[in-house]
Image: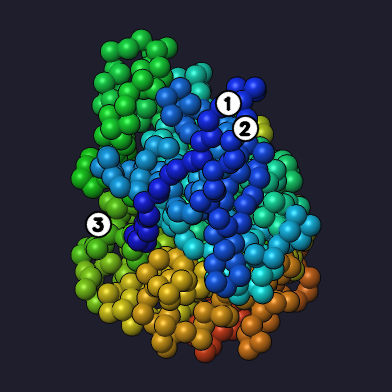
Amino acid sequence: MKAAVAYYPFFYFALLTPACPRQQQQPAPAPDPLTGPRVDLNYTTYVGSQLPNGVNQFLGMRYAAAPLGDLRWRAPLEPPSTGQVQPALQFRSICLGLGMPYPQEGHDEDCLFVNVWAPANATDHSRLPVWVFIQGGGYVSLTNANWNGTDVVQRSGNNIVMVNFNYRVGLWGFLASERLRQDGDLNIGMLDQRRLLLWVQDHITKFGGDPSHVVIHGASAGAGSVALHLTAYGGRDDGLFVGGVCESLFFPAQPYLSELEWQFDRVVRQAGCGAADRTAQMACLRGKDTAALQAANVASAFPGRTAPPTPLFYWTPCVDGVMIEDLPYLLFEEGRFIRVPVLFGTDTDEGSIFAIDATTHDEIGTFFQDNFPRLAANDTAMILNRYALQPALPKHGPWFPTASLAYGEATFICPTINVLAALAAGGGGGGVAPPAPSSLSSSSSSSSSSPTHVIGPDIFAYRYDVRDADNAAAGLGVPHIFEAAAVFGPGPGGVGAAGPAAAGYGTYNAPIVPVVMDYFISFVRALDPNPFRDGGAPRWEGWWSGCGGGWLGDGDGGWADDGLWRRGPRRSWRRLVIDTGNTRMEDVPAEQVDRCDFWASLASTTRQKARKG
């Protein structure tokens, strides 16, 4: 992911008072240099800062123990208790990402920190809605770290508490093997996120937040994480959140654990643990220094492929049969998800910052096989047949626009459309294609019966279509998570709460910023983007429109002779188009839905869904 990462040096100090024998007179306490709002979290007390706009800011607080040494590749533990008053005045280290040199300023293995912004006048009894942001980075890095939550709290009228945090990624967060399972935990990055949500339940009242009203919001891999939390443990509701926001839902190939031993073997060899007995390999890895392991935190070609190039997203969550019981589409199809209000959206040109700059049609097929290695020649032939030559774009080869469209739909847009359909249908095979009758697994609960509309009005979708001159000149269209700068506002000094913002957000696209901020803030506050929307913004209709359900008529869909799932004859799926001066509702185009049906039919080989081929 190409977003800029902002990082800040951390200056750590603590107050130490000398121990005195009981018979001696207790000396007067030293003056406390830490002034500012305090929060007692039971395991320690943090001192933050009060900003001029009436927002309290607490940066770099531990939400888990440092994941070092024997705690590597284990579920995070609660932070250790300390009697020291600690500063929460600077952002702390960001977790190490794929291919990053070590040491590098602002990044470290010790990285499990949380930041909170809250109204200065909030108390333990304020019970304000809580917005938890899960950053993205393709599970290989953290590219949205340390975004500033000040603006959204202020824009809400001091009616929310904002939280963001780091979690382990790459080798540190998603190394997987049966050998690791025997001496550690899988999907560590997801368990870090779960630990943070538990931390919010335990401590957010101290900042004025309401633990019973937490909305989780993710961008890109963060959005994929939100989807995985919706389906975690088969949709078990642990009361950690009441709503979800997915900004560019990301479904890469998510393999089964048994398919990842090659990756673990490569790391073991490169880290110098290949000679160790298989039962001792985890101990060997945990005994290595950070630099040695980070040197192994690199990508290689998937089995059967050659490098260069290496795949875009080398490390991902895996199907472990516990937290992630099966592949995402299947879990949503079968209704194994938590039913809460959701707001999902994508950008018009999701694939433009990822796609190969193709000069020939065949290069697109190779690009897909490099990233989804189970695709066979006939699969790529079908992809190429579906995606014809698109209009040319500046600074790119003739087939780049086609590659961009295909990859954007395969990885972001169609997962969003198909998951929304499943959410609205309530599972049971209604939303996306159920497994073909000849390939139903023993665990499948999909039904051929007509779908049942469950949440309907509590599902909201959008397509972000705000045009920027610089993006257009670069041939990027409306790229991946371009709305982030509008969601989080201009930030301190106008530099952008989400990092350096496109110049257009400060000039000709400035009017869209309050519109976007208020829609998102309203959803966090009311689980609906409408009650607190900007005064000039149109009403955001639900995913379904009219007739109470999006599927009209009986016998809605089935497996066709060409192997594709065909939906019923007519749907009414609606999404908001966010565009400066022209925000409006639209029907999801039938041709895009048809292409999403196509990707659903390939999902067994792309490892986005468990339909065995």
In this view, the residue in front, 467 or 157, is 157
**Other residues around mark 1 within 10 Å, as few (<14) / some (14–19) / many (≥20):** few
Q: CA distance from mark 1 to mark 2?
A: 7 Å
First-in-chain label (3 vs 1): 1
In this view, the residue in front, 212 or 555, is 212
Circles 3, 2 touching at the beta carbon (< 8 Å) = no
Q: CA distance from mark 3 to mark 1?
A: 74 Å
- Looking at the rendered structure, the secondary structure element under dot 1 is loop
Q: How many marks?
A: 3
Image location of residue 466, percent across then percent down: 45, 79
First-in-chain label (3 vs 2): 2
Residue at image position (47%, 84%) is: 510
Query: Looking at the picture, which amino acid does disc 1 mark?
Result: Cys
User: Residue 363 — which label?
Assistant: 3
- Looking at the rendered structure, the secondary structure element under dot 3 is helix
User: Residue 20 — which label?
Assistant: 1
